[in-house]
Image (spheres, rainbow, N blue to C red):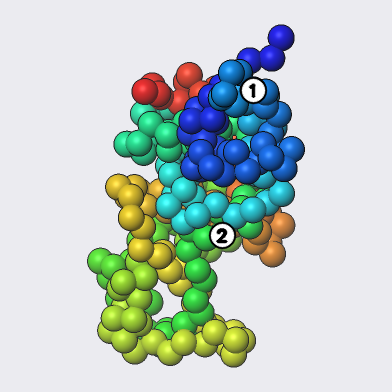
Amino acid sequence: MPSWMSVAEAAEALGVQGRQVRNLIAHAHLDAEHLGRAWMVSSASVDEYLRLNVATGRPLAAETSWWFLAAVSAALHEDRRPVEQPADRRDRYRLRKLEATSPAVEQWSAWLRRRSTGRHVWFHPGATERIRSDERVTLVDLSSDLGLAVGDLSTLYVAEVHFDAFVAAHHGRSSDGLGIADAKQVMVVPAISGSIDWHLHVAASTLVDLSSSPDSRVRHAALARLTEADAVLKFGGDQAGERS
């Protein structure tokens, strides 16, 4: 016996407007039946539509990516700290659906790619320590966490609004497309309208960065940690913190 939801409830689940739900019904992307003058939408078809759209690898918006990484951060901590969540109930519902239907961790690098944009910048080698201590920079070295003695496993994260001033302050030169061997990759985080504090989740984002590393040891170690987090999100939600 299928369960049903109203157009408004389906719109909330999918994070879209009611007219978009009606359009999906009209094009047979959602199963629905008339109840009097109103459409009732199959809950199963809503879940399937969301799952298929996630599985296609369509990248999440920047803000949604960081909310997802907040959940990953909580899942990675053994104390199962409470999950930082959006204030809006509809956004919380959609986030829970994303956690339950996320693609394979090997696809997260592409799926979450809008969280930041990689920029290659050449800095004088002598500026390394000053760059790392710059208050505009957020980084977490995961060498110890991953148990790998392969040097620095961190990536520089800088807010887009600070990027130009940051590069100028350290006399950097953009090397995008130039292939300069010793250029650093700086991850530039776009302006985010919501209340998510992305700085707190750079460790989780760096794991995603490392999951596509050309070094097989680093890549496999990062994927193993992300797989652990994914298991908590999909099957251990009650342990990952109280949900409202």
Q: Residue at x 43, y 44 (%)?
A: 67
Residue 216: % across, % down: 71, 57
Q: Quadrant of residue 233?
A: top right
Q: With respect to residue 107, does 49 lie above or below?
A: above
The residue indicated by pointer 1 is 34
> Relative to residue 134, is residue 144 drawn left or right?
right
Q: Nearer the viewer, residue 17 or 68?
A: 17
Comes first in the chain, label 1 or label 2: 1
For the N terminus, the quadrant is top right
The amino acid on which the numbered mark 1 sits, given as a three-letter code, is His
Q: Residue at x 40, y 65 (%)?
A: 190
Disc on res. 210: none
Asked whether residue 91 appears in the rendered view, the answer is: yes
* Mark 2 residue type: Arg
Q: Position of residue 118 (x, y in %)?
A: 52, 71
Residue at the front extreme of this rendering: 37
Q: Mark 2 and mark 1 in contact (Cβ < 8 Å)?
A: no
> Compared with residue 114, is residue 55 higher up or lower down, i.e. above or below?
above
Judged from the image, the secondary structure of the residue bearing numbered disc 1 is strand
Q: Tell me the residue at 30%/73% (across/down).
A: 162
Category of crowding for the residue at label 1, using alpha-carbon neighbours closer than 10 angstroms: few (below 14), some (14–19), many (at least 20): few
* Badge nearest the viewer, 1 or 2: 1
Q: Measure the C-alpha gap from mark 1 to mark 2.
A: 40 Å
Which residue is drawn at the image coordinates 60% and 86% (left, top)?
177
Q: Which residue lies under the disc numbered 2?
A: 113
Q: Nearer the viewer, residue 10 or 231?
A: 10
Can residue 104 be spotted in the picture? no
The foreground one among 99 and 155 is: 99
Total residue callouts: 2
Choose top left, top right, bottom left or bottom right for residue 24: top right
Task: Label 2, secondary structure: give it.
Answer: helix
